[in-house]
Amino acid sequence: MNPRNVEQVDALAAEYVLGTLRGRARQRLERLARTQRSIADAVRAWEERLLPLAEALPPVAPPSRVWSAIISRIGAQGSASSASRPASVGWWRGFALAGLAMSLALAVVLLRGTPERAEGNLVIVLAGQDAKPVLVASATRSSRYLTVKAVAPLNVASDRALELWMLPDGGNPRSLGVLPGGPPSAIARIELPATADQALQSIPALAVSLEPAGGSPTGQPTGPVLYTGPVQRLY
Amino acid sequence: MRSDPATQLERNARLMALLARTALKDQQAFAELYRQTSPHLYAVALRILREAAPAEEVLQESFVNVWHHAGSYVAARSQPLTWLTSIVRNRCLDQLRRREVETVAMDDEEEGVAIAAEDPTPLETLLSGADALAVKDCVESLEPGQKQAIALAFFQGLSHSELARHLRQPLGTVKSWVRRGLERLRGCLDRAGVTR
């Protein structure tokens, strides 16, 4: 193969991705792709063309021993207990992740053009089970306050309150306080125990539960969890 | 994972975020990435390798690799699922190559090309995938032999000589079906704007 022959390179890249390029020819192209940008680009372009076709295959759930083997091989410890059960991540995580795509999109819209962006932001878009965003919490990395804004109407009875929680990786929720009532567009400032960067360092998600007025009497959520959202670090 | 473009965009954003967190050694994100993509990737491996044990091994190796090298994923250059699929497919094809070396002395007829009588056939699968990607016209524009050879090579990992045996055609004929089919597909997909 002459790497400068564009047509030949492209044809070989196509058969490489299709899988019909075999044996030493395959190894040779792989080796060249590691050092020559034009060959790597040709391979990538063919991957973009052909590999999406694989999505037509009906999915097949692999046996659980595959995940166990992966976890033991990467030497997972600490949070391994939660990571070893990917299908049954706690009560909140499922729907915290469900809202991620939408919250990413919304976060981008919200942060576009804001001056804080250069410094880096943390954004949490809290959504209900229908994945519709209801509250947006954000802070700059060094801020000690979380700004919480309602982006949809909140209907909370007068004897009830919404309480905001941090959901640590593998521990009990920790309260950030009760959200003040008020008009839907009101912006609340919630004090954090440290700078946002530190306070939310090992916090994958936040949640809001419905509590008696004044907040949970037990220090743990007592009412239903209404909204959750992953902590996104945009820096 | 067939879906409309908006759902695909959402999925890509989600997978990119999970890959980014995996690169930072976030096990929760890695577990979620596995949960969301392994059924798709396992199906790819199973179809090419045709047996559960080697397919499981490839899946395991691929994810261990992803854990260590998620940082090398560069979002701007490849879709996340494409990147993951390429890792799994390349490992499958490596396995096949090793098998070819090991079985080269075995009876060719007996070894054969045992394609499981699965439903749907590779060709149907190719067409339904094409449908999902709105490039159905491109695949449809291929000649029947080209279409079939490409589907069998792509989904079942057949080599040129296996294609020739399976399709009962001379080696030169299937080679040119594959080559011309790919050229045509490229022209059509590029016109449709599939490749950025």
Image (cartoon, helix red, strand yellow):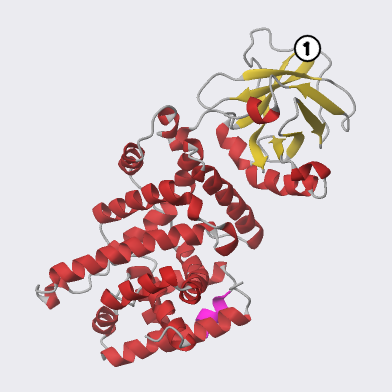
Foreground residue among B87 and A18:
B87
Please name the predominant secondary structure of the magenta segment in the image: helix
Residue at x-position 60% and y-position 61%: B76
Residue range of the region highlighted in magenta in the rendering? B135-141
Percent across and percent down for residue A93 are: 56, 33
Q: Quadrant of residue B175?
A: bottom left
Q: For the residue carrying disc 1, how many other residues have a C-alpha within 10 Å: few (<14), some (14-19), or many (20+)?
A: some
Tell whether position B80 is magenta.
no
Q: Label 1 amino acid?
A: Ala
Q: How many marks?
A: 1
- Residue A168 vertical placement versus A65 (above, below): above
Q: Give yes or no for residue B138 being in the magenta stretch.
A: yes
Res B145 quadrant in image: bottom left
| Image quadrant occupied by the C terminus of chain A | top right
- Across and down, in percent, residue A114 comes to 82, 45
Q: Disc 1 designates what residue?
A: A213
- Say whether residue A233 is left or right of residue A30: right
The reply to whether residue B145 is in sight is no
Q: Chain of mark 1?
A: A
Closest to the observer, B162 or A37: A37
* Residue lying at 39% horizontally and 74% vertically, measured from the top left: A32
- Tell me the element at label 1: loop
Q: Picture coordinates of residue B151 (x, y %)?
A: 40, 75
